[in-house]
């Protein structure tokens, strides 16, 4: 909340009257401060509670993997957009393309996904796997992921269920990589 307060302050968002961010710049500023706050809390918990390195939350030093993730995320968004367009659930009224706005929105998506994936998959799911079997851990983290989004405007039961299944899908890939890397390390050590 401390970092969000500064995000609202720097973004010039009127929180006294319950206003939400209205511009891309305001969303970017707020997301940047959310990233700082989330990373600080996760760093404290990883270092002092889990006694691990922050990078163990699922970060990679391999730039190739980062670009593959960004490209796959973009493909999923474009695919979903086109399905909605095809099903007449989305109508394009006018197109105004501004490179500056496009880059801001693209960066906003990267910030938000970085915050959510680090928190829900990198920290929560990883720690739940230690305490529960992978299916229970995946279900709990997916439910928390959906619940976190329940304050979004226009949330309904269908979007909540979709968020839950999105959390399951995203968590499945994390579990696969997490278990695969643990298997490879233990297999290498016993070899």
Image (cartoon, rainbow, N blue to C red):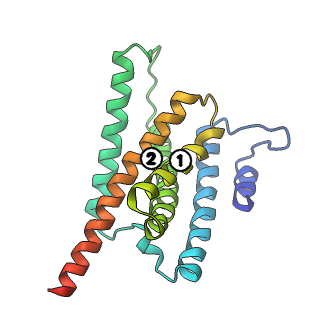
Label 1 Cα crowd, 10 Å radius (few <14 / some 14-19 / many 20+)? some
Mark 1 vs mark 2: in front? 1
Q: Nearer the viewer, residue 88 or 64?
A: 88
Q: Nearer the viewer, residue 24 or 37?
A: 37
Q: Is residue 19 above or below residue 185?
A: above
Q: Which element carries disc 1, helix, strand or loop?
A: helix
Label 2 Cα crowd, 10 Å radius (few <14 / some 14-19 / many 20+)? many
Q: Residue at x 34, y 33 (%)?
A: 78
Q: Nearer the viewer, residue 9 or 141?
A: 141
Q: Position of residue 108 (x, y in %)?
A: 51, 46
In the figure, is residue 175 to the left or right of 141? left
Q: Position of residue 2 (x, y in %)?
A: 74, 61
Q: Which residue is mark 2?
A: 167
**Quadrant hosting residue 90:** top left
Q: Residue at x 66, y 39 (%)?
A: 151
Q: Nearer the viewer, residue 76 or 111?
A: 76
Q: Position of residue 93 (x, y in %)?
A: 47, 13
**Quadrant hosting residue 92:** top left
Q: Position of residue 12 (x, y in %)?
A: 75, 46
Q: Which residue is mark 1?
A: 143
Which quadrant would the C terminus be assigned to in this image?
bottom left
């Amino acid at each position: 909340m401390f970092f969000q307060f500064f995000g609202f302050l720097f973004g010039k968002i009127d929180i006294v009257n319950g206003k939400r961010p209205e511009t891309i710049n305001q969303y970017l500023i707020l997301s940047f401060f959310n990233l700082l706050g989330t990373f600080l809390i996760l760093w404290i918990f990883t270092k002092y509670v889990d006694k691990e390195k922050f990078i163990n939350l699922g970060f990679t030093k391999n730039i190739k993997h980062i670009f593959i993730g960004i490209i796959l995320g973009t493909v999923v968004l474009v695919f979903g957009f086109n399905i909605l367009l095809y099903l007449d659930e989305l109508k394009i009224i006018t197109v105004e393309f501004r490179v500056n706005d496009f880059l801001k929105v693209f960066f906003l998506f990267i910030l938000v996904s970085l915050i959510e994936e680090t928190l829900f998959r990198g920290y929560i799911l990883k720690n739940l796997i230690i305490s529960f079997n992978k299916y229970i851990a995946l279900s709990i983290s997916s439910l928390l992921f959906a619940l976190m989004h329940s304050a979004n405007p226009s949330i309904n039961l269908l979007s909540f269920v979709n968020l839950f299944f999105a959390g399951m899908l995203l968590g499945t890939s994390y579990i696969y990589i997490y278990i695969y890397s643990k298997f490879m390390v233990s297999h290498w050590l016993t070899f």
